[in-house]
Image: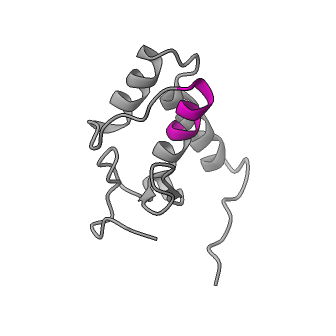
Amino acid sequence: MTTSGNGRCPSCGEELRYRGQYPAVSRTDNETEVCSFCGQAEAFADFYGIPYPEWPIEGRAAYAAYLLDHGAQVNVLELEEKVADFVERGGVEPPSPAS
């Protein structure tokens, strides 16, 4: 697995562990770690048949706008915030890292 080495997502530039979430493996090469949001955004891009944007993209809001502009019918940024709020309120416990 490839990491950026600086704790930042190579796709959007945000923290890899934003709000305590675990990184995802990018679908672009099945090797590079991206933040959870960008991993979800890539999944939505695949679902809607949208090509991935060039890296780096200017933050999560720009990625969400890119998907909406290209035909996605879900605002990934709003969805991600709702899920993170739910988890922070104790809705579910994030999984523990493997030892």
Q: Which residues are magenta?
A: 41-49
**Left/right of residue 35 with respect to residue 44 in the rendered view:** left
Q: Nearer the viewer, residue 38 or 99?
A: 38
Q: Residue furthest right?
A: 92
- Residue 45: percent from left, percent from top: 53, 31
Q: How is the image coloured?
A: one colour
Q: Is residue 38 above or below residue 97?
A: above
Q: Quadrant of the C terminus?
A: bottom right
User: Residue at image x 57%, y 34%?
Assistant: 46
Q: How many marks?
A: 0
The relative height of residue 76 versus residue 43 in the rendered view (above or below) is: above
Q: Tell me where residue 85 appears, x and y as whole percent.
A: 58, 40
Residue 61 on the magenta segment: no
Image: 87 above or below 83: below
On screen, residue 34 versus residue 73, left or right, reads left
37 or 32, which is in the foreground? 32
**13 or 84, which lies in front?**
13
Q: Based on the displayed image, in which of its 4 quarters is residue 98 positioned?
A: bottom right
**Main secondary structure found in the magenta portion:** helix
Residue under the point 40% across and 69% down: 2
At horizontal 29% and vertical 37% (from top left) the residue drawn is: 57
The image position of residue 54, as x and y in percent, is 30, 38
Image point (51%, 49%), residue name? 27
- Can you name the residue that lies furthest to the bottom here? 99
